Image (cartoon, grey):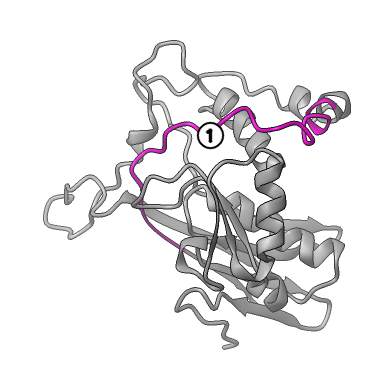
Amino acid sequence: MRATALAFEDRDRHLCDPAFGDIPLERLLDPAYLAGRAALLDRAPAGALAAPRPAGDTTFSCAVDADGNAAAVIQSIYQEWGSGVVAGETGVLLQNRGCFFSLDPDHPNCLAPGKRTAHTLTAAMLIGDRGPELVYGAMGGEGQPQTQAAIATRVVDHGRSVQEAVSAPRWLLGRTWGEEHRGLRLEAGLGADVAAALAARGHENVSLVDDFDDVMGHAQAIRVFDEHLEAAADPRGDGAALGL
């Protein structure tokens, strides 16, 4: 959870439209820098996350065909009803991801003509020598990268099936959508002892929620093997894993 907070610090400090600013990926991925950040894991958090912005409505889906072609698609209009503007008579509701812009001229996401703002939308694939090996993602605001990290680690490092990885208890640092929340939420399956230990390490507003709580977002995933596919849908949502 502390690693998530540190990653969000770097994101908020540097992430912007690369056409308008420099994102120092080489420095951020440098082993020496990462070692320095890792050294901060045992220190108490500096404080709560920055105040959240309003949030909204997202869906994620993924597919792999018989030839190994893969797609991970995430769609969002951001706030409920997006911008509240419909494009002519098309019935298409326009999104309002522009809410992530800042009016501070020194901010990496300061408003500018033709500029794309940072956002939470994240569709992922793990690519190996033979192509996509794990196609996955989730809706859920700032929970998206946290859920993705959990799924990838469980599958790759711990050998879990994709359904086990998706269904296992999750955590959420910060917000998802609709509500303001700066604390750390854990699904009940992680246990009260874990929650107490994290609070003792300096995390603020640590709380337990029910297992399979909708606030953790809805993930989907497909594992690509040489001779077959393995798919999973999140019990926290109403999605499905289907072979057609």
Q: How busy is the neighbourhood of tag 1: few (under 14 within 10 Å), some, or many (20 plus)?
A: some
* Image height of 106 relative to 61, above or below: above
- Judge whether 94 appears above or below 171 on screen: above
Q: Farthest left residue? A: 89
Q: Residue at x 18, y 48 (%)?
A: 84
**In the rendered image, the vertical position of residue 232 relative to residue 132, given as above or below:** below
* Chief SS of the magenta region: loop
Q: Is residue 178 rendered to the left or right of residue 144?
A: left
Most foreground residue, 127 or 143: 143
- Asked whether 51 falls inside the magenta stretch, the response is yes
Residue 183, image x, y percentages:
52, 45
Q: Residue at x 45, y 52 (%)?
A: 176
- Mark 1 residue element: loop
Q: Which residue is at a point 66% across and 38% down the rendered structure image?
A: 202
Residue 5 can be seen in this image: yes
- Counting from the top left corner in percent of width and height, residue 204 is at 57, 41
The mark total stands at: 1
Query: In the image, 146: left or right of 25?
Result: left
Q: x, y percentage for residue 68?
A: 71, 71
User: Could you say which quadrant of the image residue 24 lies in?
Assistant: top right
Which of the 4 image quarters holds residue 115? top left
Is residue 66 visible from the viewing direction of this image?
Answer: no
Q: Which residue range is magenta in the image?
A: 36-59
Does the stretch in magenta take in 45?
Answer: yes
> Residue at horizontal 56%, vertical 75%?
234
Considering depth in this image, is 244 or 188 the residue closer to the camera?
Answer: 188
**The C terminus appears in which quarter of the rendering?**
bottom right
Determine which residue is flagged by label 1. 48
Against 183, is 12 above or below?
A: above
Q: Residue furthest bottom?
A: 244
Q: Position of residue 87 (x, y in %)?
A: 18, 50
Badge 1 amino acid:
Ala
